């Protein structure tokens, strides 16, 4: 018996370690998941305050160093888009926070409407997207941000600029062959076209204006879903043929954008993401490419490790919440927490590894739906 007790005493710490190692990180990284899921102010507002501060300060092209002036500009533009979207969703859930967040929201809208924020598109086309008659499909992102902000501020002073943008984008999409409006000359991306559908739907919700032309746009988007994988094709050739593989990052964005315009299509895209989800010890991630297809990480996907990508995983958070899939949302949030390294600083919080762009994206994705998607 003495030998038995000695063996038990020796093995007990090892058994405790084997039990704790898999479960402790999962618990720690998911400890706020339930609060995020229900949209508690205790988790949403600290991150929203940080994003509002970043928008008031301004995040310019010089904050990024991708090696490409176009990509630096896209990331600066994206920081403002996601920041405005995230703050709008938080304010729709917590209107009592308007006093401390609305200044950041208005600063973000002003930033988005400033010509220098669109300089990357102007350089590509030779004209500002807001005065052009074709192209500039990336302006759908601007339309989504303004549409969400208009739900918060229906009588905003920039309302006429929003109306003019949507009218122009609608005309461009209707004039584009097959509803394939180019983002840059010769470059067409279905995720960007999904943003146009979301932008117009949000405008209709905020203003009551009908937009029946969207049915054709949704049908076109449906045709760009890869039937084998369920993922959205990332880019198209001029004639409409797929130019790149279906991708998780673009599908994640597309599912969020289309949740404002056509819930069944959004759910179909989300199911494609779920089919490419990987889960280990309660941590979830989404593959960038379909099974049997491999590729390198790029500006869209972020790093790709063991087939899964940062962007696909982060963007999938939004549609998991929109489509009320708490289990997947929780697994993805654990992964975002593990690699994002959230840090509370007084009344604010930030994801250390993501910087202003990462904070803005995660605020928008974590707070997506259900109210804003109805």
Image: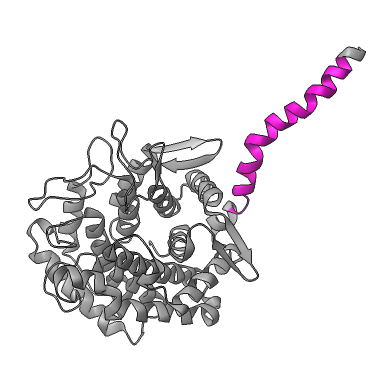
Q: Main secondary structure of the magenta part?
A: helix
- Residue positioned most to the front: 67
Find residue 93 and report its horizontal and vertical position in percent. 50, 68
- Residue positioned most to the right: 2
User: How many numbered circles does the render carry?
Assistant: 0
Q: Residue at x 69, y 35 (%)?
A: 20
Q: Is residue 39 magenta?
A: no
Q: Name the quadrant containing residue 227.
A: top left
Q: Which residues are magenta?
A: 4-32
Q: Is residue 14 magenta?
A: yes
Q: Residue at x 48, y 63 (%)?
A: 355
Find residue 296 and report its horizontal and vertical position in percent. 32, 42
Along the horizontal axis of the image, is 55 left or right of 146? Answer: right
Observer able to see residue 80: no
Along the horizontal axis of the image, is 275 left or right of 280? Answer: left
Residue nearer the viewer, 166 or 49: 49
Residue nearer the viewer, 184 or 254: 184
Q: Residue at x 20, y 77 (%)?
A: 130
Find residue 348 and report its horizontal and vertical position in percent. 59, 69
Along the horizontal axis of the image, is 249 left or right of 237? Answer: right
Q: Is residue 182 above or below residue 307?
A: below
Residue nearer the viewer, 123 or 139: 123
Q: Is residue 295 above or below residue 77?
A: above
Q: Which quarter of the rendering shows the C terminus? A: bottom left
Observer able to see residue 68: yes
Along the horizontal axis of the image, is 116 left or right of 30? Answer: left
Q: Name the quadrant containing residue 165.
A: bottom left
Q: Is residue 103 above or below residue 316?
A: below
Q: Which quarter of the rendering shows the N terminus? A: top right
Q: Name the quadrant containing residue 113.
A: bottom left
Q: How is the image coloured?
A: one colour
């Amino acid at each position: 018996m003495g030998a038995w007790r000695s063996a038990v005493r020796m093995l007990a710490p090892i058994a405790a370690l084997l039990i704790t190692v898999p479960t402790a990180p999962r618990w720690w990284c998911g400890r706020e998941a339930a609060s995020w899921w229900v949209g508690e102010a205790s988790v949403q507002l600290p991150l929203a305050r940080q994003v509002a501060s970043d928008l008031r300060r301004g995040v310019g092209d010089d904050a990024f160093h991708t090696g490409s002036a176009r990509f630096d500009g896209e990331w600066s533009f994206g920081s403002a888009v996601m920041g405005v979207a995230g703050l709008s969703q938080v304010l729709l859930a917590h209107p009592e926070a308007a006093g401390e967040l609305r200044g950041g929201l208005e600063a973000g809208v002003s930033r988005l409407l400033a010509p220098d924020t669109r300089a990357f598109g102007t350089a590509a086309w030779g004209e500002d997207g807001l005065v052009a008659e074709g192209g500039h499909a990336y302006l759908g992102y601007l339309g989504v941000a303004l549409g969400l902000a208009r739900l918060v501020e229906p009588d905003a002073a920039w309302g006429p600029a929003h109306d003019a943008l949507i009218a122009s984008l609608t005309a461009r999409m209707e004039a584009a062959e097959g509803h394939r409006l180019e983002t840059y000359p010769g470059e067409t991306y279905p995720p960007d076209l999904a943003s146009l559908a979301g932008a117009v739907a949000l405008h209709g919700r905020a203003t009551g204006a009908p937009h029946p032309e969207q049915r054709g746009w949704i049908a076109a988007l449906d045709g760009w879903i890869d039937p084998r994988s369920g993922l959205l094709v990332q880019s198209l050739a001029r004639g409409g043929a797929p130019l790149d593989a279906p991708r998780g990052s673009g599908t994640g964005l597309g599912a969020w954008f289309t949740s404002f315009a056509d819930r069944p299509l959004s759910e179909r895209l989300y199911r494609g993401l779920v089919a490419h989800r990987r889960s280990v010890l309660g941590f979830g991630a989404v593959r960038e490419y379909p099974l049997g297809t491999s590729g390198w990480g790029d500006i869209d996907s972020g790093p790709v490790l063991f087939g899964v990508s940062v962007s696909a995983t982060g963007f999938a958070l939004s549609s998991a919440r929109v489509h009320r899939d708490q289990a997947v949302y929780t697994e993805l949030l654990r992964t975002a927490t593990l690699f994002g390294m959230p840090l509370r600083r007084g009344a604010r919080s930030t994801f250390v590894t993501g910087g202003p762009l990462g904070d803005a994206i995660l605020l928008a994705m974590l707070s997506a739906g259900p109210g804003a998607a109805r």
